Structure formats: structure tokens, C-alpha cells
Amino acid sequence: MAKFVAGLEDVIALESSICLVDGTHGKLYYRGYSIEELAAHSTFEETAYLLWFGELPTSFQLKDVEDSLLDNREFPGEVLDIIRDFPPTATPMEVLRTVVSALSSFDRNACYFSREADLCKTMRLTAQIPVAVAAHHRIRSGLPVMTPRAELGHAANFLYMLQGIEPDAVSARAFDVALVLHADHELNASTFAARVSAGTLADMYSSITSAIGTLAGPLHGGANQQVMQMLEEIGDMARVEEYVDRTLKEKKRVMGFGHRVYDTTDPRAEVLRQLSQEVGASKGDLRWFEISEKIRETVWRKKQLYPNVDFYSASLYHVLGIPHDLFTPVFAISRIAGWTAHVLEQYANNRLIRPRAEYVGPRNRQYVPIDDRGEYPVLPELRDQESPQEGTQTQ
Ligand code: COA
């Protein structure tokens, strides 16, 4: 039997032509195009097309995909009612997970399994996830849900629907680039979850629901919100050294640092760093960028860890005015492009994903009748928690 590898580290689980992560050289490519080039020249819509179809679109093809995303922004009223019914304590990731699952019942393609039907679902999910995130935030804040604006691109329209005002050009472009940077990352945990579901020939909505549940964890997409919590807790450049010292001494993680695949800089962190500085300067608020810079320098000096994608996205999203508990849903707004591309690729050449476990438990035990089992400790009394314990609630 094959060798056990904890966390499947460096295990090649499948073949893919979507995304290459060169962790040794700190490079990332979508369909062969470097992330730096795409960040400089592309838009989210164009990058999504590239991920789905394997080639950069012509202007006609781009217009087609933009029109399709635009048409699909219309959101089922019944699902808006579901969003309204959530208790105020519901986290945005809980709501998103449930909404994506519910959207399936309102998609007439849901029961069809063909490439064409799956592309329709792909466009619909990509268009509707941002609408759902913005609508939930407006509803929980007691604000009216905004109608999408047809003249705004995918990124700008989300900021508009969230904040109720059209974003300035610097903010809209910075957010668009952030969406490009987060759109795919090979076989990360949430994409793997999506492909495991798709590998059973579960439908697109089920696969994306699996991915969203997986993204929520603080070691994955939940990290960007925790980075912002750290920045706020530190609050001042003078406290960085002490914070990093204490965190490392207590053997805790400094959020936004380290990566399973990169041995060097995460190339996305470099672009996000520039965006965080640029948008911070344009808003006259460089405080969070400067604290981030100090943390980066300190963590490097003490532990030689590089920042990952979640580190500078936190200060960037903060200066863009995005509420902190929406940072992870915003990750999903972008990663839906990659998730759906991977689900399409999985369907196109499917093989059930079913690894093995190395059994380390007891063997060959004799069944003991219940009266002969002696005294067992009783279960502790299980009570609802008063409030989330520190570190267990991430959204
Ligand atoms: N803070 C402090 N130490 C860290 C660290 C961090 N963020 N990330 C890794 N390390 C340390 C580990 O403690 C370990 O040190 P040791 O060898 O002295 O014990 C070493 O680096 C290797 O860590 P390991 O847990 O084996 O790496 P991994 O590949 O399993 O973990 C992450 C990868 C992303 C889960 C991990 O870096 C992490 O938890 N980062 C913080 C959460 C985060 O930012 N997630 C977003 C990822 S994009």
C-alpha cells in the first residue's frame, strides 16, 4: 500500500491544466499566463473566461461572458427571503453556504448534467455570489438591497451593491485586481473539496457548497479576517515586536504568514502589498499598511516566514471599506471562478477521488456484551455555549 503522507503534502492527486504554482520560485500562472501579467492587464471577467475556457477571450467572447454575468445578476426573490430570515447572529459565511445550496432549487438547469448546463450554472453562481454577499450585508444592516448597475463591471458592481455608492476608479481597479489574484490556486483545500464532490458526479451546486464550507476555516480563507483582527489588536507600530514575540513564544500562528506550497514569497502578496499602499494613500489612511509592513519585517527577522495572499488583502479590503467579516466571502466571490473551472475539468475527465487511510486502531477485538463492559465514565453534561470561545469562531 502507498506511503502515508500527513495532510497529503506534496502528493499529486490529479492532473490539471488550469493553474501552476511554482512554490520554489514564487511564481503563479493561470493557464500559462503569469499572475503579474494578469494583474497588470486583465479584469476578473477576462481571467474567469481564461480559467473556464483555457484561452484569453477575443473582444466578442469577452463581451459574451460579461453580458452573461450581467444577465445572471438577477437574484431569485425567494432566496432573498431566505436571507432575510437568518437571525442577526448568522455569519456571512454561514449565509453564503446556505444561499448557494438554495440557489440550486431556483436554477432550471440544476437537474441537467451537460457541459452547456454546467457552464450556465458557472455563470449564474459567479454572478450571484457577489449579489448574495452584498444583499445579506445590506439586510443585516437595515439598509435597502441595491439593484445591480448594468454599466458597472463585476468588481465595481459588488462594491456599489455593498456600499450603495459607486466606487472611485482607484478602488474599483484595486478590487478587480484582488479578484484576479484570488481566482484560482491549484489544488488548495476548498478546490480539492469541490473536486472530491464533483468526482462523485454530485452537481455543481453541491460541489461549490462543499468548497465554501472548506474555505471558511482559519487555516484557509478565514485567515484574512483574522489578519485584520491581529492588526486591530496590535493597533500601533510600537506594539508589533511584543505581539510577534508573544505569538511565537506561545507557539501560535501569526495569521497571514507561511504557506504549504511556497518556499519563498507568495507572488500574490507582492501585488496586494502594492495595492494596499496605493489605496491606503488614496484614502489618506496608511496606518494599516504601515503596521503590516512592520509585522512583515518582524516575522521575517524572527521566524523567516513570508506573507501569504491573506496578509495584505486584509489591510486592502479594510481601506476599501469592506466589513471585516466579509473578507472570507469576498475570497469566495473571486475563487468561484477557479472552483467552477476545476469542477468542469473534473467532469470532463472524471475519476472518483477516493484515497485510503492507514488504519492505526486496535485489531481483532472480541465483541463484549453490554452488561460485561464494567463502569465507564459518564459523558460530561453538554450545554450550549454562552458565546463563541476565542479562536473557534472565525467569521
Ligand atoms: N506563524 C508562525 N509559525 C508558522 C506559521 C505562522 N503563520 N506558519 C508556519 N509556521 C511554522 C510552524 O510552526 C512550523 O515551525 P517549526 O518547524 O518550528 O515547528 C513551520 O513553520 C512549518 O509549519 P507547518 O505547520 O508544517 O506548515 P503547513 O504547511 O502545515 O502550514 C499554513 C501552512 C498555511 C496552514 C500555516 O503556514 C499557517 O497556519 N499559516 C497561518 C494561517 C494562514 O495565513 N493561512 C492562509 C494560507 S494562504
Image (cartoon, rainbow, N blue to C red):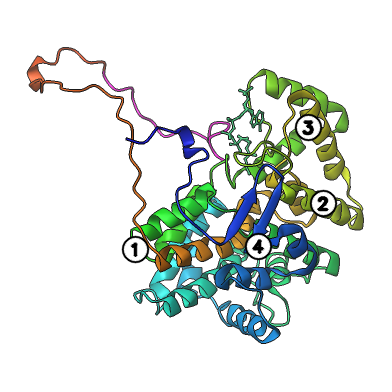
Q: How far apart, in angstroms, are the residues tagged by discs 1 and 2?
A: 40 Å
Q: Position of residue 26 (x, y in %)?
A: 71, 46
For marks 1 and 2 on the same chain, the one whose residue lies earlier in the sequence: 1
- The residue that disc 2 covers is 276
> Of discs 3 and 4, which sits in the foreground?
4
Which numbered marker is on residue 44?
Answer: none
Q: Is residue 143 left or right of residue 297?
A: left
Q: Nearer the viewer, residue 292 or 28?
A: 28
Whether tag 3 and tag 4 are in contact, CB under 8 A, the answer is no
Which numbered marker is on residue 234?
Answer: 3
Please name the amino acid that badge 3 sits on. Ile
Q: How far apart, in angstroms, are the residues tagged by discs 3 and 4?
A: 40 Å
Is 335 part of what is drawn in magenta? no
* Mark 3 Cα shell of 10 Å, populated few (<14), some (14-19), many (≥20): some
Q: Secondary structure at mark 1?
A: loop
Please name the amino acid that badge 1 sits on. Leu
Q: Is residue 60 left or right of residue 205?
A: right
Please name the amino acid that badge 4 sits on. Gly
Q: Secondary structure at mark 2?
A: helix
Please name the amino acid that badge 2 sits on. Ser
Quarter occupied by residue 145: bottom right
Q: How far apart, in angstroms, are the residues tagged by discs 1 and 3?
A: 47 Å
Q: Position of residue 222 (x, y in %)?
A: 59, 45
Q: How far apart, in angstroms, are the residues tagged by discs 2 and 3?
A: 18 Å
For marks 2 and 3 on the same chain, the one whose residue lies earlier in the sequence: 3
- The residue that disc 1 covers is 201
The C terminus - image quarter: top right
> Of discs 1 and 2, which sits in the foreground?
1
Whether tag 1 and tag 4 are in contact, CB under 8 A, the answer is no
